[in-house]
Image (tube, rainbow, N blue to C red):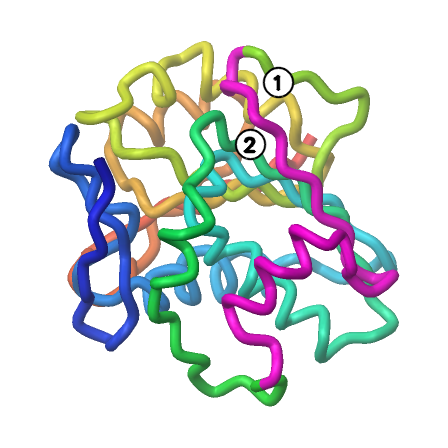
Amino acid sequence: MLSIFPTKDGSDTLLDDSLNVTYHSINGAIQESLHVFIEEGLKKLEFSKDKIRILEIGFGTGLNAWLTFLETKNKPLFSVEYIAIEPFPIEKEILEKLNFPQINFENKEISFQLFHQKIEDDSFENNFQLKILKVKWDEFNDFQKFDLIFYDAFGPENQPEMWSKEALKKAAEYLNKNGIWVTYCAKGEVRRNMIENGLRLERIPGPPGKRHMLRGLKYS
């Protein structure tokens, strides 16, 4: 069962009662997503090409996708193909009740709820394509690689299979050269596994309430 849980920055997250884990940081859902996935992920890419492919592992509420979409609204000549994996989609009735106020964005007309309506209607602009796949990570298959991977599964203590050597190796293999892999998790074992898989790993400052996070660059 899922219940709505307010966080310290004024935005909501969801609490999975069966696992006793929240979908985002209780110190701020929007703050966390902006810091980890937008500032330290999307904005760190060198935009040497006019289109990038993003893979999100753990779509959840769609917060990361919404924030990415808002970034593309400010860059009309830049396009994104966004593939998200979510084996357990959240019901529309729950998503409609979430409070995600828009903070420091020019495009205030694109609310979180309107974004989800665009998903339902498949009415995105030409420079943003979104596909949500109802599959587990070990079932996922794509013939192309990605420039950016948002690794946003539940933590190792709640979803250990997502942080196994096999799961992390698969993520590394799906990265293009100079691609970025980013996650809120900062565990040493995760860092070592990704280094073994050919990524240059950085442990960098995390969002409010979290000391560190990980960002990896695939250099070969």
Work out which quarter of the rendered image holds the C terminus and state it.
top right
**Label 1 crowd bin: few (<14), some (14–19), many (20+), radius 10 Å:** few
Work out which quarter of the rendered image holds the N terminus and state it.
top left
At a point 41% along the width and 55% down the height, the residue shown is: 95
Give the answer, above or below, for where 79 lies relative to 83: below
What amino acid is labelled 1 in the image? Phe
**Callout 1–callout 2 Cβ contact below 8 Å:** yes
Q: Secondary structure at mark 1?
A: loop
Report which residue position mark 1 lands on: 140
Q: Does label 1 or label 2 sit earlier along the sequence?
A: 2
At a point 28% along the width and 52% down the height, the residue shown is: 24
Tell me where residue 148 appears, x and y as whole percent: 63, 45
Tell me where residue 213 appears, x and y as whole percent: 32, 49
Residue 115 falls in which quadrant of the image? bottom right
Q: Secondary structure at mark 2?
A: strand
Q: Is residue 50 left or right of residue 44?
A: right
**Label 2 crowd bin: few (<14), some (14–19), many (20+), radius 10 Å:** many
- Report the magenta residues as a range: 109-138
Q: Residue furthest front?
A: 93
